[in-house]
Amino acid sequence: MGDNMEKLVLIGFMGSGKTTISRILANRFGFRCIDMDTALEEEAGMTITEIFAAEGEAGFRKRETALLRKYAEEGVSPAGGNGFILSTGGGVVVTPENRPLLKKIGRVYWLRIKPDTVLERLSKDRRRPLLQGGDRREKVEKLMKERTPMYREAADCTIDVDGFSAVHVANLIAKGEGLGRPQ
Ligand code: S3P
């Protein structure tokens, strides 16, 4: 990583490791670490599950876009650190307006993951409203299919995370690797 202030944004499906990897990088490089889901929960005074229950997915997406707009318009303070790393929710790319906003905020890394890996990692998850009830494989595959072109459009860089630890992926990002601009 260089001396200039780093502005990193992590996007990717649920379970791709965005939060863990952003914490590793933030600790290592003294970045400010911002987790959008946590920020939204604090702002709403509700958990993500409660926001979905009270306002539906549409309400949650509105909150997500409003926060992203704020980051893009006002900038994100590194709070005395060397930069920041913003970890987003898996569905942030679904709202078309968000995709250019992400790029405005920083360099966007897409942590690309296969449905099988998501299912393995999140087999016991109870905190993600979009995965509860019904056939989880069907849900993951459908969402992945819909979202893949959206992640591609939003990303500057792609990293395949299947079979790799969070530390390994963090090292790739730290070394400035990734597959470059996805096709
Ligand atoms: C969502 C992913 C979640 C959270 C919400 C919706 C999605 O974030 O924002 O449950 O639409 O994929 P994680 O990717 O951190 O699980």
Image (spheres, helix red, strand yellow):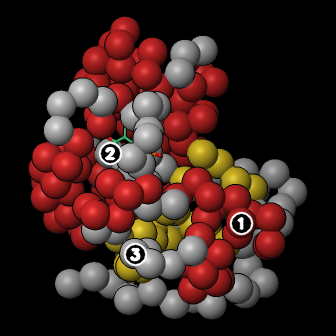
Where does the image place residue 152, in percent across and percent down from the top left? 25, 70
Q: Is residue 148 above or below residue 130?
A: below
Residue corresponding to mark 3: 162
* Residue, disc 1: 24
**Mark 3 vs mark 1: which is more N-terminal?**
1
79 up-or-down from 28: above or below: above
Q: Quadrant of residue 133?
A: top left
At x 37% / y 9%, what residue is drawn?
54
Question: Which part of the image, by quadrant, shows the C terminus?
Answer: bottom left
Q: Nearer the viewer, mark 1 or mark 2?
A: 1
Q: Nearer the viewer, residue 120 or 36?
A: 120
- Give the image location of residue 4, x and y in percent: 73, 79
Distance from the alpha carbon under mark 3 to that under mark 1:
18 Å
- Image quadrant where one finds the N terminus: bottom right
Query: Which one is closest to the eye, mark 3 or mark 1?
Result: 3
Q: Amino acid at mark 1?
A: Ile
Q: Amino acid at mark 3?
A: Asp
Which residue is under mark 2?
Answer: 91
Could you tell me which residue is drawn at 57 percent across and 85 percent down? 172
